[in-house]
Image (cartoon, rainbow, N blue to C red):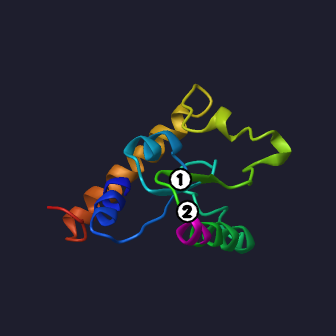
């Protein structure tokens, strides 16, 4: 997405990237970036929290209007798990003996579903 934003900016189309991977997006050098320190896949807020989502989108729109320097980053003030001192980082993408069997079973189920979709002609690729 960051490279697309840079291409659009080069063509004169202003962009704002909203994301949760600060190091990657800033390394790509996007013009305007709204960073939300949440697990990947949730850059515009917690699922179902429409007030938070509106605020983050509003922040992005304000950045589009008011950013006057290149490579501007704004960080949202939200915390994913305030009650647990943002403990999601301790468990995000973690594989250990406690979850290894469940993850392996989920992966096998996904592979079966993909094979069935391919056999039924529902797969995205041949």
Q: Residue at x 20, y 64 (%)?
A: 119
Residue 26 marker: none
Q: Main secondary structure of the magenta part?
A: helix
Which residue is denoted by mark 2 in the rendering?
67
Where residue 19 sits: x, y (%)? 52, 55
| Residue furthest to the left | 126
Label 1 to label 2: alpha-carbon separation = 7 Å
The residue that label 1 is drawn on is 72
Q: Where residue 100 sits: x, y (%)? A: 53, 32
Say whether residue 44 is magenta.
no
* Front-lying residue, 112 or 88: 88
**Which of these two is toward me, 28 or 36?**
28
Disc 1, SS:
strand
Is 20 drawn above or below residue 91 in the view shown?
Answer: below
Q: Relative to the observer, which residue lies in front, 62 or 101?
A: 62
Disc nearer the start of the sequence (1/2) = 2
Q: Quadrant of the N terminus?
A: bottom left
Residue 63 magenta: yes
Q: Magenta region: which residues?
A: 62-67
Q: Residue at x 22, y 70 (%)?
A: 120
Q: Is residue 118 left or right of residue 82?
A: left
Figure quadrant of residue 10: bottom left
Evaluate if marks 1 and 2 touch, with contact meaning CB atoms under 8 Å apart. Answer: yes
Name the image quarter holding the C terminus.
bottom left
Which secondary structure lies at badge 2? loop
What residue appears at the point 62 percent right and 54 percent down from the top-left corner? 74
């Amino acid at each position: 997405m960051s490279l697309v934003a840079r291409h659009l900016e080069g063509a004169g189309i202003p962009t704002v990237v909203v994301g949760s991977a600060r190091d990657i997006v800033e390394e790509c050098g996007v013009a305007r970036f709204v960073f939300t320190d949440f697990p990947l896949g949730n850059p515009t807020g917690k699922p179902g929290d429409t007030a938070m989502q509106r605020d983050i989108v509003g922040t992005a729109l304000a950045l589009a209007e008011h950013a006057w320097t290149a490579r501007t980053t704004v960080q949202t003030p939200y915390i994913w798990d305030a009650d647990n001192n943002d403990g999601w980082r301790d468990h995000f993408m973690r594989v250990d003996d406690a979850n290894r069997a469940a993850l392996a079973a989920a992966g096998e189920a996904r592979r079966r579903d993909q094979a069935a979709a391919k056999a039924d002609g529902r797969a995205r690729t041949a």
